[in-house]
Amino acid sequence: WCDANGEIGKKLLEEYVNTDRGPMDVTRASGYKALWKCATCEHEWRTKICNRTTANNPTGCPKCPGFVARSNKFQVWCDANGERGKTLLEEYIDPDRGPTRVTNGSTYKALWKCATCEHEWRGEGGGRPNK
């Protein structure tokens, strides 16, 4: 798969550092959680191979800027939850990490601004949909 997918495949092959199973021992859609090492920051993490090879928005290093969460995106939740979602998106003003880069249940402390009193605060955004 990597050989047939140009730069993306080359990058994934470089970042695949799993010693238990080599790249020839797994399939591109595998649910196996392999070990990866970021070519940019050298952070190591485990994620399913399918998250990096078959997704429309494949995951990357969770420590690097530009990381896109694989699922449970806050933005997606808000878009699907009517007025509550619309209100939360209006109050979400974090300049460092947009709503597509935060997941439901995340412990990231995003910047919020109350639509009523304009008070700003940092709080865990992933839990707000449940409140």
Image: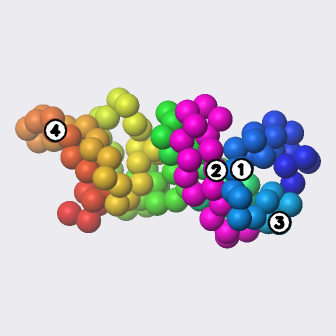
Residue highlighted by disc 4: 121
Residue 115 location (% of width, % of height): 17, 41
- The residues bearing labels 2 and 4 have C-alpha atoms spaced at a distance of 35 Å
Q: Is residue 118 left or right of residue 106?
A: left
Circle number at residue 36: 2
Few, some or many residues within 10 Å of mark 2 (<14, 14–19, 20+): many
Does 93 lie within the magenta span? Answer: no
- Magenta-colored span: 29-46
Amino acid type shown at disc 2: Trp
Residue underneath mark 1: 16
Residue at 67% over, 70% down: 31
Residue at 47% in and 45% down = 100
Which amino acid type is shown beneath numbered disc 4?
Trp
Reply above or below: 59 against 111.
Answer: below
What x and y, as percent, mark residue 22? Answer: 79, 59
The stretch drawn in magenta includes residue 44 = yes
Q: Residue flagged by tag 3: what amino acid is it? A: Asp
Q: Is the residue under label 2 in contact with that under label 1 (CB below 8 Å)? A: yes
Q: Residue furthest right?
A: 4
Q: CA distance from mark 3 to mark 4?
A: 48 Å
Q: Extreme front residue here?
A: 19
Question: Residue 61's quadrant in the figure?
Answer: top right
The answer to whether residue 3 is above or below residue 130 is above
Q: Which residue is mark 3?
A: 25
